[in-house]
Image: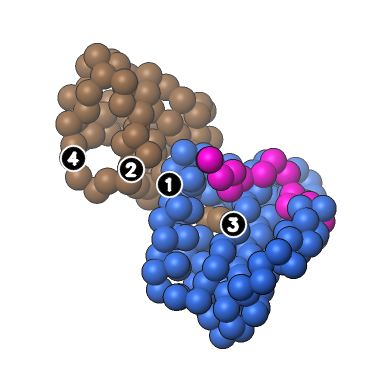
Amino acid sequence: MEVNYLTEGPVSQKLISRLIEKTGLKTDSGGHMIFLGQVRADEIKGKKVKAIEYSAYKELVNAEAEKIKKTILSEFSEVKSISIIHSTGIVKAGEISLLVFVSAGHRHQAMQACSKTVELIKENLPVWKKEIFEDDSHIWK
Amino acid sequence: MEVKVLFFGVLAEVSGTSVKHYRDVKSINDLKLRINDDFPEIVHYNFRISINSEITDNNLLLKSGDEVAFLPPFAGG
């Protein structure tokens, strides 16, 4: 089954809740670590960011996300599952654009594996962002 | 022969398109020259290239139907 790593618009509270609800089924895990990346209302040269428009190369995102999961699973023996969801399209300041959810046997590996997953996403996931200001001008990051 | 070229992020803005087809390009270097001719501004940007969803730094030969993507530095998260 093909996993969908991308979601159109912000990562919804509903999606986050659904993943948290499922933790009860993972009785082999002693710790879950969730990272939520949020759009910041940065101020650059007097202009405030109102949203970020994300674009992604879907096929390559899928390939790279699979590689990231494989790397984490081989490095952290206690990790049971890893979920990665990244936004595409418009995400407003204050909304969530990235979710990483790692479940592991014990807390240390859950925390370390989650942190490393986020770093690998930053480095390797083919996603681009256009920061849109309140006056509708933009810059690429 | 024809290859499909995808432009992402700022490069889609620079080229004014996210997809363009090129005929009779033998290799990555060949394609880069054609793209530099069409979009001279592209030389000011850093990018990597993928062929059929596989990132490569080599000047590989191209075949008909290949999908080549121009990828600016990633900025997810």
Task: Check if mark 3 and mark 4 are on a common chain.
Answer: no
**Mark 4 residue crowding within 10 angstroms, few (<14) / some (14–19) / many (20+):** few
For the colour brown, the matching chain is B
Name the amino acid, label 3. Answer: Ile
The residue tagged 2 is B54
Task: Tell which of A129 and B46 is nearer to you.
Answer: A129
Is residue A75 in sight in this rendering?
yes
Distance from label 4 to label 1 (Cα)?
22 Å
N-term-proximal mark, 1 vs 3: 1
Judged by depth in the image, the label closer to the viewer, 4 or 1, is: 1
Front position in the image: A107 or B74: A107
Distance in Å between CA atoms under marks 1 and 3: 13 Å
Contact check, label 1 and label 2, Cβ < 8 Å: yes
Q: Amino acid at mark 1?
A: Ala
Say yes or no: labels 1 and 3 on the same chain. Answer: yes
Q: Camera-side residue: B31 or A10?
A: A10
Quadrant assignment, res B61: top left
Residue A112 % position (x, y): 53, 79
Answer few, some or many: residues within 10 Å of disc 2's Cα (few below 14, many 20 plus, some between 14 and 19).
Answer: some
Examine the image and state in which quarter residue A88 appears. top right
Residue A103, image x and y in percent?
A: 61, 70
Q: Please name the residue that numbered disc 1 is placed on.
A: A63
Q: Do labels 2 and 3 touch, CB within 8 Å?
A: no
Chain the render paints blue = A
